[in-house]
């Protein structure tokens, strides 16, 4: 997964929260980890979306990815296993986002 450079990073502080979606079946997440480090500077709540959770047989790979990201940011407000392709888990994320207002 690639992420887009935000040309006006000062605007990030205007957001209620940031959701970082990562490919849960990948073994390397260098770009995403760098993104988490950058967002952390703004001290806004962060959510971790573990995409492709439908492709793993058991929870261990998801827990491994989550642990890797929690080493960088131990204060993720929420960690959600999702499948964007199958729309699994997205309703939970949407409801939570809507409850935050903004």
Image (spheres, rainbow, N blue to C red):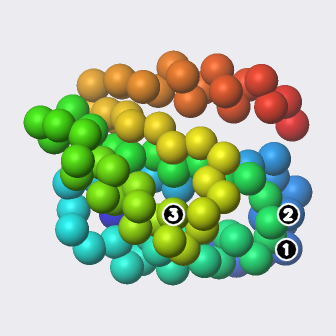
Residue 43 location, quadrant: bottom right
Residue reaching furthest to the left: 57
**82 lies left or right of 80:** left
Residue 102 location, quadrant: top right
Q: Position of residue 86 (x, y in %)?
A: 27, 25
Q: Position of residue 36 (x, y in %)?
A: 57, 70
Sooner in the amino-acid sequence: mark 3 or mark 1: 1
State the separation of the CA atoms marked 1 and 2.
6 Å
State the residue position of label 3. 70
State the residue position of label 1. 10
**80 lies left or right of 1:** right
State the separation of the CA atoms marked 3 and 1.
24 Å
Is label 2 in a helix, a strand or a loop?
helix
Is label 3 in a helix, a strand or a loop?
helix
Whether residue 22 is visible here, answered yes or no, is: no
Whether residue 13 is visible here, answered yes or no, is: yes
Sooner in the amino-acid sequence: mark 2 or mark 3: 2
Q: Residues within 10 Å of mark 3 (few under 14, many from 20)?
A: some
Q: Residues within 10 Å of mark 2 (few under 14, many from 20)?
A: some
User: Which residue is drawn at the image coordinates 46% and 46% (left, top)?
Assistant: 49
Q: In this view of the protein, which residue sits in the foreground, 18 or 11?
A: 18
Are dots 2 and 3 in contact, CB under 8 Å?
A: no
**21 lies left or right of 72:** left
Are dots 1 and 2 in contact, CB under 8 Å?
A: yes
Q: Position of residue 25 (x, y in %)?
A: 20, 54
Is label 1 in a helix, a strand or a loop?
helix
Note whether 1 is above or below 45 in the view shown.
below
User: Which residue is drawn at the image coordinates 54% and 22% (left, top)?
Assistant: 92
State the residue position of label 2. 13
User: Which residue is drawn at the image coordinates 34% and 44% (left, top)?
Assistant: 51
Tell which tag, 3 or 1, sits nearer the viewer: 3
User: Which residue is drawn at the image coordinates 84% and 74% (left, top)?
Assistant: 10
């Amino acid at each position: 997964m690639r992420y887009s450079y935000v040309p006006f990073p000062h605007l990030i502080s205007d957001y209620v929260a940031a959701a970082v979606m990562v490919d849960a079946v990948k073994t390397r997440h260098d770009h995403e980890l760098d993104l988490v480090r950058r967002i952390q500077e703004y001290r806004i709540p962060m959510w971790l979306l573990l995409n492709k959770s439908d492709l793993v047989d058991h929870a261990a790979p998801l827990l491994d990815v989550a642990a890797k990201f929690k080493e960088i940011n131990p204060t993720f407000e929420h960690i959600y296993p999702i499948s964007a392709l199958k729309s699994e888990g997205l309703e939970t994320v949407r409801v939570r986002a809507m409850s935050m207002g903004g």
